[in-house]
Image (tube, helix red, strand yellow):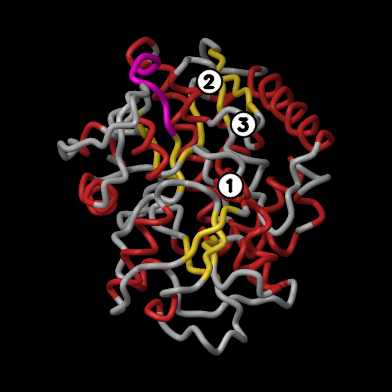
Amino acid sequence: MSRSSVPPHRWRQIVATPLGRLCGAILTLAVLALGMAACSSSGSGSTGPTASVSVALDWVPNTNHSGIYVASALGYYRQAGINVQILPYGTTAPETLVATGKANFGISYQAGMVFARAAGEDVVSVFAILQHDALQIGIRKNNTTIRTPKDLDGKTYAGFGTPDEGPTLAYVIKRAGGNGKFTSVDLNTSAYDAVWSGRADFTLSYMTWEAIQGQLAGKPFKPGFALGQLGLPDNYSTLLISSSAYLSAHPDIARRFLAATQRGYQYAAAHPDSAAKILIAADPTGLGTQTKLVTESTAMLARGYYLDAAGYAGPETVAEWAGYGNLLFDAGALTNANGTRITTRPDWSTYFTNAYLPSGSK
């Protein structure tokens, strides 16, 4: 749904997302108003000292953010003594905003975090919003020339310009017996239309958003091309990140904020219909026009993405970080601040921390 490190794709910037950019001035003002409302409402009736926390979105509000809006609407932040200010997505990536102290927390994703930290930015993941890879290769369902990833050799990929796309696609194509060679054109939010019009053969899309969106619009993608089904190491499609500087200076606030956020995502997992209604109410001019999409997306996320194997929202593991992180490292995709390829394998345990989550869920 979005990928914050390279705007605006993150299709994790396409998010609310693609198949049509909802990012207009009116929507931006609506999100700003929402952030202010969340801040003011969560401060009243607090049972303890109140602290302000800012969260930078990676695109317009969408189901990846459900737990945050739930925690605000149901008073979890207020009860924790937290005023949450939601910062709408702009031209600066959330990773940069967090690293430079302009936001306390931000929405990211595993590859985006890897690239930012490898380049020397002060970012660390503190909460896995999505526990698994939610991406699939998007191919028109009626495309009879592509039956397996091997058939993508020589085809045209409509992409978003992030450095993880090439290594990811080459990996799954080679696993299927191909050579991993294809033509890539950066189209951002036009990628989906390009695939359906025949100007491109395939793209990457979120099964939890664009795939549902296409199905509802009568433009379904071909099934069986989920990256996880094609052998790609599992990874965290959406993360909540902070900086070591902020965490060191405000450990108690971070713990209170993340405990309330975890409650929000636990609620979204247990009550997806209610969570969808809360999210829609928070963004009526945007998501209010896509109620079926939001409802189906929230339900899918609740079934298999919000919670880990133990039933908790948030925790991360070294194994999941290392699997996909090593793929990117081995592909030579990691560079330092000077653009020089990193030749020492990172210590993936330093890229995230569970230390600020409630003790029972770590």
Q: Is residue 25 left or right of residue 206?
A: right
For marks 1 and 2 on the same chain, the one whose residue lies earlier in the sequence: 1
Which residue was labeled with disc 3? 75
Label 1 and label 2: CA atoms lie apart by 20 Å
**Is 324 covered by the magenta stretch?**
no
Residue 224: give x, y in percent of width and height. Answer: 45, 79
Q: Give residue 324's position: percent from left, percent from top.
A: 28, 52
Instruction: Farthest residue to the bottom: give it.
Output: 144
- Indicate whether residue 242 is drawn in magenta: yes
Helix, strand or loop at mark 1:
loop
Give the crowd class for mark 3: few <14, some 14-19, many >=20 residues within 10 Å.
many
Q: Which residue is mark 1?
A: 9
What amino acid is labelled 1 in the image?
A: His
SS at badge 2: loop
Between disc 1 and disc 3, the foreground one is: 1
Q: Is residue 103 above or below residue 158?
A: above
User: Within the image, what quadrant is residue 54 found in?
Assistant: top right
| Place of residue 179 in the rendered image (x, y in percent of width and height, measured from the top left) | 31, 72
